[in-house]
Structures are given as structure tokens and as C-alpha cells.
Image (tube, rainbow, N blue to C red):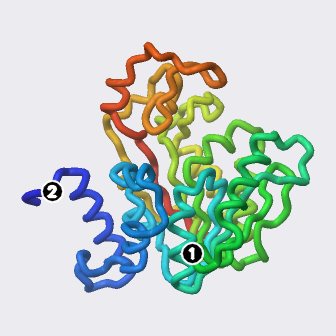
Amino acid sequence: MVGLDRREFVTRAAIGLAASAAAPGLAWAAGADPVLADVIANGPRAPADKARDVWRHPEASLLFWGLKPGMTVIDVDPGSGWWTDILAPYLARTGGHYIATGADLTNPKVSDEARKGRAAFEAKYIGQPKLYGDVTLVSFGRASGPLAPLGSVDLVLISREVHNFAQVDGFTEKAFGDFHAALKPRGVMAIEDHRAPDGADPKKGDGYISEAYVVEKAKGAGFVLAARSEINANPKDTKDYPFGVWTLPPTRRSAPGGQPADPAFDHAKYDAIGESDRMTLKFEKA
């Protein structure tokens, strides 16, 4: 471990474990996916997104979840495309298919902000097959229909979204049911989210959600917990901040949501914590 700090060592070890699971007998250093590694290092990613790799561990996380060439992957509510800029080029280069969920435009209650977000995503990613492949955008919401043909998807990625699902009665169950229907037998539901202590109120609204809640809802939808990882753990995260998890980087909120930023707010101690402590869970369709 000479020359490696703890975070780098954990990340490399996680990559090795994931690679070993996929190809027993191969040394972890030789087992990583070279196309994935190249996309992460040299793909169409913003410098600010790359800077977050030290906290988000994209290669180790995706190998842990079992990403492989040629897969069909659903990325749930990808926002500005942090994962899209990795997954879409990777799948384009390996013969796979990237599907993103967006605002359900058939729902008259969908906000203007959500509509604008979907339009911005379409403008960036749709119609650039050489770079991103044949990107598909499907509606997803409280009343949306199937996300894909039944049993056609290899992996569904839900990154930092379950805490939002939990704010609406019944929506976690509906969402997990949609994912289960879309996945092939033994297909993977990959979850990363800000981790609350078990027993925490899922509707607290601070951006955190407990592993116990996620596991309970996943099992209720017909999934089995295949593995959990500490790839994205952060023991410095005390989870008791004035503006919830959004007090931490990268959001660095300094005032309640919807209010102007406070220029006098001292970010130093929160920046020193880094990004949140996050669960990293792998479920399989039973």
C-alpha cells in the first residue's frame, strides 16, 4: 500500500473484487474493463464531473454492480448527466443501449422546471449516435407506464433518487415495480443513495434514506439483495446539517431551499467532510 492513501486503496480493492467476481482467477489489476476505464478517463466528461470521481468512484461502483459490454441499461432520472456521460458512450462503444427516464409529459402536474430539464437532456444527448449511441428517453412518474418491454433490461441504475421517491406515498413501491417489470430474470437494480441510520424517518426530507427502508421496499417488489459495498462510504458524514445533505459538496447550500445563498455562510467545515456517506447496493430480480 506504499504510495496509496486509504481512499485510493479502497477504490482499487473494490475494482479488484468486482473484476474477480466476473472473471475468477484474474488479478484485480488486470481485471477491469478497459473500455469503461477509457471512457471514464477520456470520454466526454466535464472537468468538474471528473473531479468528483474521488468521491463517487464510478469505475469501482459500475464493476461492483456488474456492468458489462452490450447491456441494456436504464438510468433513472439522470439529471444533468453525470452518469450519462459514462454509460452512454460506454454502451455505444460496446453494442449496448442506454435508456434514461425523464419527466412524464402526459402528467399535467409536472413542473415547468422538470419539463425544461427533460428538454435540456434531449438537446444534449439525443441525435448524437457516434458519441452517445441510440439514447432513448422514456417518461417516468406517478402514473407513467412501462419503461421498456417486459424483461428486456439488464441493469437499472438509481443514483441518489430513492430519498426523493420516499417523499410521495406509494411511489417507491410503484417505481421498484416498474424496474422489476423491465428487468430480465437475474437483472440488476443498482442503488446508490445518501445513507441515513436505520430507523430514520424516510420522509424527513433531509436527503438521506436508510438502507433498511431500501431493502424492505426492494424485497417487497420481488428483488433479493445480492451484495452491498462500502465503496462510497464516508465516515466523516455526521448527517446533521442545517440544510440537509445539500449543505455538503457538491451542492454547498447556504440557505433554505428556494432562498438566496448566504454569502456569510462558512462552508469550510462542511467542505472538509466531502460528499455524503452513501449506501451502494446490488439487488437482483428474483
Rendered position, 11 above or below 31: above
- Secondary structure under tag 2 reads loop
Residue at image location 52% in from the left, 61% down from the top: 225
**Quadrant including the N terminus:** bottom left
* Badge 2 amino acid: Leu
> Which residue is found at the position 61% from the left and 71% from the top?
73
Q: Residue furthest top?
A: 264
Left or right: 91 as drawn, with respect to 105: left
The correct choice, above or below, for 86 with respect to 211 in the image is below
Q: Which residue is painted at 41% across and 67% down in the image?
A: 40
Can you identify the residue that label 1 sits on? 131
Which one is nearer the viewer's eye here, 75 or 216?
75
In the picture, which quadrant includes the C terminus? Answer: bottom right
Q: Quadrant of residue 12?
A: bottom left
For mark 1, give the secondary structure.
Answer: helix
Going from N to C along the chain, the mark reached first, 2 or 1, is: 2
What residue does disc 2 label? 4
Q: Amino acid at mark 1?
A: Leu
Q: For the residue carrying disc 2, how many other residues have a C-alpha within 10 Å: few (<14), some (14-19), or many (20+)?
A: few
- Residue 282 x, y percent position in the rendering: 50, 63
| Quarter of the figure with residue 138 | bottom right
Give residue 67's position: percent from left, percent from top.
49, 74
- Residue at mark 2 to residue at mark 1: CA–CA distance: 34 Å
- Residue 109: x and y in percent read 88, 41
Please state the horizontal and vertical placement of residue 198, each as a whole percent of the image. Answer: 49, 37
Residue plotted at (33% across, 24% down): 268
Q: Quick one: 140 or 122, which is closer to the camera?
A: 122
